Each structure stands twice: as structure tokens, then as C-alpha cells.
Image (spheres, helix red, strand yellow):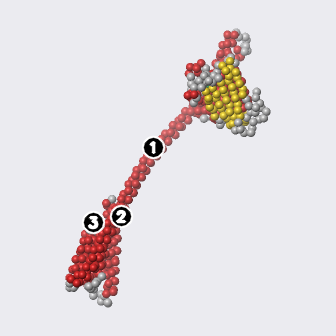
């Protein structure tokens, strides 16, 4: 940074030197034109000025270029002081203005040489003035008083130029400091840029890896879905045969069966149906996870959906002391939905209610509103601990393993139900406490103003 300050200083000096030299030459030429009166050989001092000033400027420039700045400054200053003194002697008069010209070089000296140089130059100029007075043979104490005026004025100028030079030096230093800070900032920015491009490259790499992993996962998911579809198809066909043949045999389709045989056949049929239900749930879940679960929506009334689900649940509680309550509205709303899947959702909830309720009631309550319908499935069964309310909606979660074992299940019914309801733009929530029954509340959007008139409760 010191080098920078020095460079700026040299720039200024190299600009000032030719300007001062040109002004001096012009003054010399002007003097020649003005005072020579056709005889141009008359005033040798002016010729010295016209020739000496540019020569001194040239020499100074060369010295500065050779890194001898101080010497160059002195050569320039002393030469010009001598030239001014020569002109002073040549044009001697008691109240000559020429000594004031020293001021120019007192000022430039502080710039060319250094801060203290203005005083040294002033001292030199004063000595030369005195010498000039002596050389012109006019020395006397009265005349000494006359040159005291320019000497004092030049001293004042030396002080002023010193102050200006200090200011200038400080300005230069603050510019240098600003430049240093800008450089630092540039370096920091460069570093940040480097880090950024490195991070960018890393991100690109991670992105590529992620993309590869995603493709892999997608491939795997496709494989799994295909596998699930195949397996469930392969299992469902023989299972259906088992269930149907057991039913036919139990009904006496191939001859009378004993009560014991009928009981066995009934168990085969029930177990087969249960395995079919589990298979269906597994297949649904696999499709939900792979994003391939499809709905076939249409405008449907809620009434047949509720009735289908209730008739299904009737078969599940026929041997229990459980009352089935239908709390239906006067007018049924119409919704945009997949009838089969909505029935499945209600069967899941009513099926759970039947599974976990041994006495009391199971109610299906339907409350249509202006934009949505609220469906509550309420039971008086074992209930669910509030801390498990969110858990029961997660796949394969059965909150009480021992109770769940007594009541068969996969832990897929509620997650599938929640997905079905969400796909219809609805929500599902549970209110329950251990031993106090459960209420699952579904809210589904309806098609406004579309309730078909006259469909009433069954
Ligand atoms: P599962 O096939 O085991 O019934 P679900 O996903 O349908 O699976 O239910 C998850 C768990 O939530 C059940 O294991 C049970 O503990 C609890 N649960 C669901 N419905 C009820 C209910 N009506 N009463 C008590 N517990 C219930």
C-alpha cells in the first residue's frame, strides 16, 4: 500500500513538473517580447529562463524515473530559484515583483521533495535574494528593508504550502486506505465466489445422486407393485375357490353334511374371507404407496353407501348384545365420489366398531350441512387411549397387541380409510378414551343444493 501512495505521488509530480516548466517558459517568452524592444540579446536572464526551465524539467523527470526523486526535486527547485535570481539581478529595481516568483517553487518544493522542503526552499530563496541584492551592487540597510517584504510573504506561503501538503498527504493516505479496504473486500468476494462454486458443484453431485436414488426407488416401487398385484391375484383365485366351495358344501350342495362338518366348513369359509380381506388391504396399501391407487368418482347419494356398510356390520354383531342405530337425515346429500371406496371406508370403521364392541350400541349418524356432510361412527366398545389417537392411523399399527390378537386385524384399515377420505377432499378424526367407546368423525364435501328430495331414512 505504501507503494500505491508513492505511485500516486509520482503521478502528481510528473504532471506538475511540465506544467510549471511551461508556465515558466511562457513567462520568459512574454518577458522577452515585452522588455527586449527589438533587441533580443539584451536580457540574457530571460533566455536562461526559456532554455533552463525545460532542461531542468527534463533532468528532473529522468532522475525521478531512475528513482532519485529527492535529487530530481532539488535540481528542479534550485535551477528555478537561480533562474528567478538571475532575472531579479537582470531587472533589478528596489521594489521589483520578481522575488515573489520564488513562491511558486516554495510551493512545488513541498510536493516534489517533502514536507520540510518548503522551508528549506524559502531559506534558499531568501539567501539568493540577498545574493542578488549584493550582485546588483545595491546593497544597503534601506534596500534590505525593501526585500524583507517578499521574504516574509514567501515565509507565509511556505507555512501555507506545508499545511496544504500535510492535507494532501492525509487525503492520499485515506484514499490508499479506502483502496486497501476495497481490495480486501474484493479478495473476500473472490473467496466467497470460490466457496459458492465449490458448494454448487457438490450440490450438483448430490442432486445427481438423489436423482439416481429416486430412479432406483421408482424402479423398486414398480417391481414391488407388480409383485403385489401378481401375488394377490395368484392367492385370490384359489382362495375364492376355497371360500365358495366351502360355502356350497356347507349349504348341502353336494349332499347332507353333519353339524360338525357344517361347523368346520363355516370356519373354512370365515377364515378364507378374512385372508381375502387382508390381501385386499395389502394390495390397496401397496397401490396407495406407489401412487397408483385409482378412484372412479361419480355423483352418488350417501344413502346406499351407508346402507351397504350397515348391512355388512349386521353380520358381524348378530351374536353380540349390540344395538345398531341408524341416525339418518331427512334428506340425503349428494357427493362426488367413488361409491365402492366410500363404502369400503365406512365398512372399515363400522367393522372396527363391531370388532371392539361387545355390548352397548354402534351408531351411524349422518348430519348434512350447506357445504359438507358429517358422518359419525360411534361405538360403546373398548375405546382408544388418547395418546394413541394419531398412532392408529399409521400403517400396521395396532395399539394394544394383546387385544388386537384376540380381534384379528392387520393395522391397515384406518390408514387406508384416511387415505380414501382425503382423496375425496375430506377429513377424519377420532374422539375416544379407554373403556368409553370411540367416535370416528368424517367430514366430506357435498355438491351444494343437490340433495335429492324425498330420499328419507330407511
Ligand atoms: P385393524 O385391522 O387392526 O383393526 P385398523 O387400522 O383398522 O387395524 O385399526 C388400528 C388399531 O386401532 C386397532 O388395532 C385398534 O387397536 C384401534 N381401533 C380402531 N378402531 C377402534 C375402535 N372402534 N375401538 C377401539 N379400538 C379401535
Task: Look at mark 2 in the image and give the residue it sits on.
Answer: 171
Task: Look at mark 3 in the image and give the residue it sits on.
Answer: 67
Tell me the CA gap for discs 2 and 1: 46 Å
Residue furthest bottom as drawn: 38
Tell me the CA gap for discs 2 and 3: 24 Å
Residue 354 placement (x, y as % from top left): 65, 22
Q: Sequence order check: which comes first, mark 2 or mark 3?
A: 3
Q: Quadrant of residue 225?
A: top right
Tell me the CA gap for discs 1 and 3: 51 Å
Quarter of the image that includes the N terminus:
bottom left
Q: Is residue 214 left or right of residue 259?
A: left
Looking at the image, which residue is at 56% across and 33% down?
A: 221
Q: Is residue 424 left or right of residue 45?
A: right
Instruction: Say few, some or many: other residues with alpha carbon within 10 Å of mark 1 (under 14 / 14 to 19 / 20 or more).
Output: few
Q: Quadrant of residue 297?
A: top right
**Is there any visible trace of residue 193 in the rendered image?**
yes
**Is there any visible trace of residue 244 in the rendered image?**
no
Q: Sequence order check: which comes first, mark 1 or mark 3?
A: 3
Q: Which of the pair 373/145 is nearer the observer? A: 145
Instruction: Say few, some or many: other residues with alpha carbon within 10 Å of mark 3 (under 14 / 14 to 19 / 20 or more).
Output: few
Mark 2, secondary structure of its residue:
helix
Quarter of the image that includes the C terminus:
top right
Task: Look at mark 1 in the image and give the residue it sits on.
Answer: 202
Amino acid at each position: 500500500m505504501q507503494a500505491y501512495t508513492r505511485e500516486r505521488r509520482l503521478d502528481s509530480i510528473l504532471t506538475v513538473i511540465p506544467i510549471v516548466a511551461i508556465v515558466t517558459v511562457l513567462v520568459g517568452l512574454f518577458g522577452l517580447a515585452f522588455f527586449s524592444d527589438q533587441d533580443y540579446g539584451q536580457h540574457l536572464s530571460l533566455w536562461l529562463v526559456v532554455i533552463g526551465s525545460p532542461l531542468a524539467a527534463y533532468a528532473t523527470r529522468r532522475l525521478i524515473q531512475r528513482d532519485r526523486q529527492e535529487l530530481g526535486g532539488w535540481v528542479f527547485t534550485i535551477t528555478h530559484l537561480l533562474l528567478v535570481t538571475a532575472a531579479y539581478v537582470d531587472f533589478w529595481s528596489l521594489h521589483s515583483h520578481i522575488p515573489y516568483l520564488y513562491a511558486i517553487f516554495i510551493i512545488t518544493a513541498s510536493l516534489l521533495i517533502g514536507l520540510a522542503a518548503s522551508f528549506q526552499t524559502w531559506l534558499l530563496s531568501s539567501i539568493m535574494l540577498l545574493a542578488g541584492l549584493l550582485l546588483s551592487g545595491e546593497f544597503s540597510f534601506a534596500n534590505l528593508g525593501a526585500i524583507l517584504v517578499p521574504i516574509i510573504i514567501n515565509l507565509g506561503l511556505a507555512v501555507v504550502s506545508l499545511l496544504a501538503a500535510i492535507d494532501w498527504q492525509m487525503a492520499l493516505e485515506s484514499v490508499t486506505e479506502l483502496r486497501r479496504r476495497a481490495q480486501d473486500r474484493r479478495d473476500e468476494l473472490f473467496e466467497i465466489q470460490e466457496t459458492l462454486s465449490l458448494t454448487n458443484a457438490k450440490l450438483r453431485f448430490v442432486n445427481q445422486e438423489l436423482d439416481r436414488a429416486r430412479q432406483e426407488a421408482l424402479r423398486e416401487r414398480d417391481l414391488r407393485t407388480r409383485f403385489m398385484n401378481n401375488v394377490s391375484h395368484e392367492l385370490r383365485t384359489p382362495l375364492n375357490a376355497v371360500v365358495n366351495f366351502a360355502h356350497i358344501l356347507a349349504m348341502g350342495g353336494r349332499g347332507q353334511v353333519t353339524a360338525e362338518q357344517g361347523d368346520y366348513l363355516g370356519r373354512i369359509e370365515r377364515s378364507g374371507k378374512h385372508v381375502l380381506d387382508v390381501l385386499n388391504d395389502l394390495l390397496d396399501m401397496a397401490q396407495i404407496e406407489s401412487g397408483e391407487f385409482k378412484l372412479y368418482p361419480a355423483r352418488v347419494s350417501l344413502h346406499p353407501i351407508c346402507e351397504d356398510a350397515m348391512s355388512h356390520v349386521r353380520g358381524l354383531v348378530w351374536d353380540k348384545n349390540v344395538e345398531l342405530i341408524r341416525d339418518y337425515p331427512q334428506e340425503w346429500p349428494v357427493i362426488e365420489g367413488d361409491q365402492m371406496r366410500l363404502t369400503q371406508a365406512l365398512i372399515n370403521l363400522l367393522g372396527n366398531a363391531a370388532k371392539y364392541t361387545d355390548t352397548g350400541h354402534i351408531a351411524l349418524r349422518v348430519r348434512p350441512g350447506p357445504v359438507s356432510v358429517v358422518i359419525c361412527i360411534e361405538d360403546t366398545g373398548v375405546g382408544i387411549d388418547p395418546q394413541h389417537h394419531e398412532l392408529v392411523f399409521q400403517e400396521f399399527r395396532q395399539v394394544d397387541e394383546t387385544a388386537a390378537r384376540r380381534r384379528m386385524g392387520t393395522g391397515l384399515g384406518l390408514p387406508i380409510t384416511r387415505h380414501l377420505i382425503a382423496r375425496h377432499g375430506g377429513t377424519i378424526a377420532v374422539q375416544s378414551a379407554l373403556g368409553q367407546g370411540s367416535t370416528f368423525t368424517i367430514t366430506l364435501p357435498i355438491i351444494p343444493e343437490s340433495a335429492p328430495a324425498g330420499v328419507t331414512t330407511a
